[in-house]
Amino acid sequence: MAEDKEAYGSFQAYTSCSRNRDKAEEFGNTLFIMEVLVAFIADLSRLSEYSAEEEELVIPGVCFCVKSVKFDRTKNKHFIHLQLRQRFS
């Protein structure tokens, strides 16, 4: 998908994410950076047990295209930039 700028995918399940990049970088070896154009996303931070994570929920069906994929050797982490919108046409 990263090589084909016209290709897109969609989230098939509820997907939890964080607006707090520093907190998100504490987990795993891959960080998805999501640029939201127009999409249904719910802010769960006030409902979450971990409000500092600034949790948001992406609903199933939200589409995305991959804008870039990079690997940072100093952090040993993949950075994948996604552009989200409710529908690509």
Image (cartoon, rainbow, N blue to C red):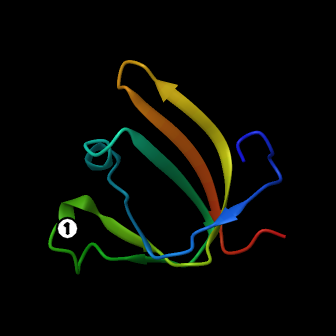
* Residues packed near mark 1 inside 10 Å, few (<14), some (14 to 19) or many (20 plus): few
Q: Determine which residue is flagged by label 1.
A: 51
In the displayed structure, does residue 55 sit left or right of residue 77? left
In the displayed structure, does residue 31 sit left or right of residue 2? left
Name the residue type under label 1.
Answer: Ser
Q: Quadrant of residue 46?
A: bottom left
Quadrant including the C terminus: bottom right
Question: What residue is at 67 percent from the left and 75 percent from the top?
Answer: 86
Across and down, in percent, residue 80 comes to 54, 42
Of all residues, the one furthest to the left in this rendering is 49
Of all residues, the one furthest to the top in this rendering is 74
Q: Say which of 36 and 2 sits in front.
A: 2
Indicate whether 38 appears above or below 3. Answer: below
Question: What residue is at 79 percent from the left and 55 percent from the top?
Answer: 7
Tag count in the figure?
Answer: 1
Question: What residue is at 50 percent from the left and 76 percent from the top?
Answer: 13
Across and down, in percent, residue 82 comes to 60, 52
Indicate whether 29 appears above or below 1. Answer: above
Q: Say which of 20 and 29 sits in front.
A: 29
Across and down, in percent, residue 25 comes to 31, 42
Across and down, in percent, residue 2 comes to 70, 42
Secondary-structure class at tag 1: helix
Question: What residue is at 32 percent from the left and 43 percent from the top?
Answer: 28
